[in-house]
Amino acid sequence: MQYGLMKRLHLRKYNIRNGELTELLKRDVHAPLYFFILKAASLAFGNSIGVMKMVSVFPTILMAIGGCLFLKKEFSDKAALIFLLVLIASESITRYAIEIRMYSWALFFVTMMAVSAFYFFKTSQKRWWMALLLCTAGAQYTHTYAMVAAAIVYCLLLLYTLIYRKENRFAILLLGGVASIFFLPWLIVVAKQFSHVSGNFWIEPLTLSTILGYMNIIFSTGYIFVNIVFFFLYCAVLVFFLARKNKTVDDHFLFGGLCCAVLLVSSGIILSIVVSPLFYDRYLIPVVGLVWLFFAAQCAAIPSKRIFISLLVALSIMGFTSFLYSAQREAEEHKESNIFYTHITQRLQQDDVFVFDVSASRSHLPFTINSLLPNKISIPSDTTKIDTLAPSLFFSKRYSSSRIKWDPGIYNDRTVWTFLDGFDKDDTKYENIVPSHLRGVFQGEFQYNFYRFRLYRSEPDSEL
């Protein structure tokens, strides 16, 4: 249950109307489409975690089917098979296919943009014009970096027309213009979001490790050694493509997908250097499908049957190991989450108060805990920040978990649970953050999915 889910559960709980939802999202840093899709699915099929996960699984399945059918028809059965295997082997794709977040939708829209553009050039049929526009709008309104990827795709398509399809130059310019007009209503919001997070975002400064993380999100299988093999395998196929003398126009078209990924990373790095760190590894997820479409088509073009079979075997082994890793990870996270949930629910009282560490300006943990254990009074450790911190969480009129006004006497006769991010065992931090009258007994180190925290409990009459 990730940060994206937290807000969705709040939306479900308080029955926010569409207009109010839009206003809430304007204060957020995410695009709105996925929120509305999830809300519609919850209304139609219920509010279970399974339904919410299926909202992420559905576009991944559509992307896999669409990519395989495209490669099968335009390249070969071998290309479709390779594409399917790399989707299974990619731990990043399988992870975000079941996370209650927008990334699988961003992946679907950007990948289908490429497929739609391919058939737009090939057939000039109006349905592919419309498909390209709809996929573009979907990408723009699903994630900020999916929007950036869509803009890069249009620049590459224009370059493609200048080289190979000069008769389509005007059409691409027209489509790009219409897509820009579609995005204008949200562009002002994006500009405000950008100014809000510039210099005050949670992403760490750019380092060599960060850049390596960008590659890892593409080639992740769950095991470092297998990741390295995967990377060098891709490099070998890329060298094969560059050395080929019989490259087709279609090959160059799919090569643009790899170029899109490189340009997206470059844009993120430049932005992080010039403005502030604003690019995280998972923001590459929207273009991963483009990277693997190119790879699959080039693998299928390898003339040696022996080499191709070796590739199939290698990718099958990678897929199997990646699946094992994903299954073990899910089981472990589920186990750790259950340990925390059991511990706190056995001791939790109706009027207990939750206090969260806000020294790092993070609100992910409060959203997580308040969605798991709703209707509790939630307070930032620094109460002077109540008016500036997460209006959708702390004491907001409509969206807070308690709908009450701040009162220093709120601690009276209540058990206080204090959550500190991470497993930092330096008690000095705890003493500096938590007022003396709230300090309690250390409960242990817990993990809820990938959120790690230390938990303290203070009884109302305890003398500490």
Image: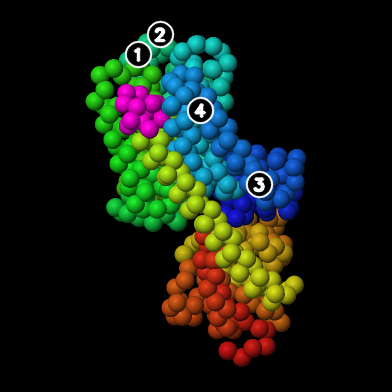
Would you say residue 305 sits in the magenta stretch?
Answer: yes
Would you say residue 430 sits in the magenta stretch?
Answer: no
Disc 3 to disc 1: CB gap under 8 Å: no
Q: CA distance from mark 3 to mark 2?
A: 44 Å
The nearer-to-camera label among 2 and 4 is: 4
Badge 1 element: loop
Identify the residue shown where x is 46% and y is 80%: 427
Q: Within 10 Å of the Cα at label 3, are there few (<14), some (14-19), or many (20+) other Cα atoms?
A: many
2 or 4: tag closer to the N-terminus: 4
4 or 1: tag closer to the N-terminus: 4
The part of the image, by quadrant, that contains residue 261 is top left
Q: Within 10 Å of the Cα at label 2, are there few (<14), some (14-19), or many (20+) other Cα atoms?
A: few
> Taking the image as drawn, is residue 102 in sight?
yes
Q: CA distance from mark 1 to mark 2?
A: 9 Å
Give the color scheme: rainbow, by chain, secondary structure or one colour. Answer: rainbow
Name the quarter where the N terminus is drawn: bottom right
The nearer-to-camera label among 4 and 3 is: 4
Give the answer, above or below, for where 428 lies relative to 274: below
- The x, y position of residue 192, in whole percent, is 50, 44
Badge 2 element: helix
Give the answer, above or below, for where 42 lies relative to 295: below
> Taking the image as drawn, is residue 114 in sight?
no
Magenta extent: 294-309
The part of the image, by quadrant, that contains residue 89 is top left
Q: Within 10 Å of the Cα at label 4, are there few (<14), some (14-19), or many (20+) other Cα atoms?
A: many
Residue that carries the numbered disc 4 in the rendered image:
68
Identify the residue shown where x is 43% and y is 20%: 75
Q: Amino acid at mark 2?
A: Glu
Residue 52: mark in rendering:
3
Q: Amino acid at mark 3?
A: Met
Residue extending furthest toward the top: 167
